[in-house]
Image: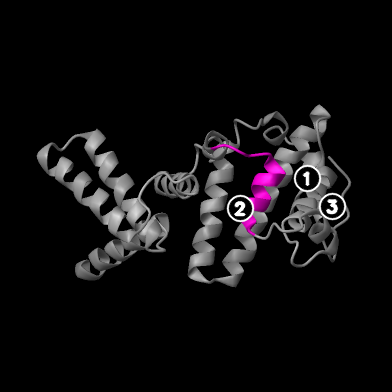
């Protein structure tokens, strides 16, 4: 049993300390102390999705709870790395703070001096990450992103190198071609190409395909539930 004095106000440092206590090899929680990055990976995804639901609902009480759960996941993974001696919470915070300053030369004088003449967010990221080729750009799009979101990110980066349709007309032509292939033969490959072409057309129209489908699915559910009542 651990001594812990309840606080009137808790801080991020308190959260780190609580996770350390739960992870203690001798006296920690039997479940928490044996977890690994891999074993709680799905928890991170679930908590993030629940936070997004709270954001979509514009529910401040739910948002406060779910954002706390996401923060707990961040701390949990960081404490695992702290135990390995690879990095800690201070280094995580330092890196994201340095990144934010570097990527805002319009706000911070130090970044303005370092990045004279570079104003776009993507150009700053490329400089920071040392990305110079199309392969560099594509390889850094996470494979774990939802499919439509990943497709549009890949298409956006490819477009900067002159790959893919240049405008809405070109995207519409590619979409028509993909639709014709699907109509001729309804295979998984043709289905994928149709979805890819649709995602690109939406990107060029300024529509987030992932969000569009998410909200369409929500409306679909609401309609079915309304019809049932």
- Mark 3 surroundings: few (<14), some (14-19) or many (≥20) residues within 10 A: few
Give whichever of discs 1 and 2 has the lower sequence position.
1
Q: What main secondary structure does the magenta stretch of the protein show?
A: helix
- Where is 210 relative to 38, above or below? below
> Which is closer to the viewer, label 3 or label 1?
1
Disc 3 from disc 1: Cα separation: 13 Å
Q: Residue 32 at what x, y percent from top left?
A: 70, 36
Residue 187 falls inside the magenta stretch:
no
CB under 8 Å between callouts 1 and 2?
no
User: Is 207 on the left-hand or right-hand side of 102?
Assistant: left
The image quadrant where one finds the N terminus is top right
Q: Which residue is denoted by mark 3 in the rendering?
A: 13
Give whichever of discs 3 and 1 has the lower sequence position.
3
Q: Which residue is denoted by mark 1 in the rendering?
A: 92
| Residue drawn at 72 percent across, 56 percent down | 103
User: Is 179 on the left-hand or right-hand side of 24?
Assistant: left
Say whether residue 22 is visible: yes
Disc 2 from disc 3: Cα separation: 33 Å
Q: Residue 80 at what x, y percent from top left?
A: 75, 34
Q: Quadrant of residue 151?
A: top left
| Residue drawn at 87 percent across, 50 percent down | 4
Q: Quadrant of residue 204?
A: bottom left
State which region is magenta: 120-133
Query: 179 and 12: which one is in front?
Result: 179
CB under 8 Å between callouts 3 and 1?
no
């Amino acid at each position: 049993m651990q001594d812990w004095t309840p606080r009137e106000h808790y801080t991020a440092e308190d959260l780190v300390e609580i996770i350390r206590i739960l992870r203690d090899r001798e006296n920690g929680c039997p479940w928490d102390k044996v977890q690994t990055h891999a074993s709680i990976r799905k928890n991170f995804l679930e908590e993030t999705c629940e936070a997004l639901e709270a954001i979509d609902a514009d529910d401040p009480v739910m948002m406060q709870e779910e954002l706390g759960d996401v923060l707990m996941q961040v701390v949990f993974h960081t404490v695992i790395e702290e135990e390995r001696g690879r990095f800690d919470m201070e280094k995580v915070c330092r890196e994201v703070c340095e990144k934010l300053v570097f990527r805002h030369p319009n706000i911070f004088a130090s970044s303005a001096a370092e990045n004279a003449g570079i104003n776009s967010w993507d150009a700053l990221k490329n400089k920071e990450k040392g990305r110079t080729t199309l392969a560099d750009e594509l390889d850094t799009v996470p494979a774990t992103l939802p499919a439509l979101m990943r497709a549009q990110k890949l298409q956006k980066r490819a477009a900067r190198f002159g790959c893919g349709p240049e405008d809405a007309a070109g995207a519409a032509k590619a979409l028509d071609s993909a639709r014709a292939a699907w109509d001729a033969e309804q295979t998984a490959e043709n289905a994928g190409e149709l979805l890819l072409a649709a995602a690109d057309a939406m990107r060029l129209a300024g529509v987030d395909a992932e969000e569009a489908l998410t909200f369409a699915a929500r409306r679909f559910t609401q309609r079915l539930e309304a019809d049932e009542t």
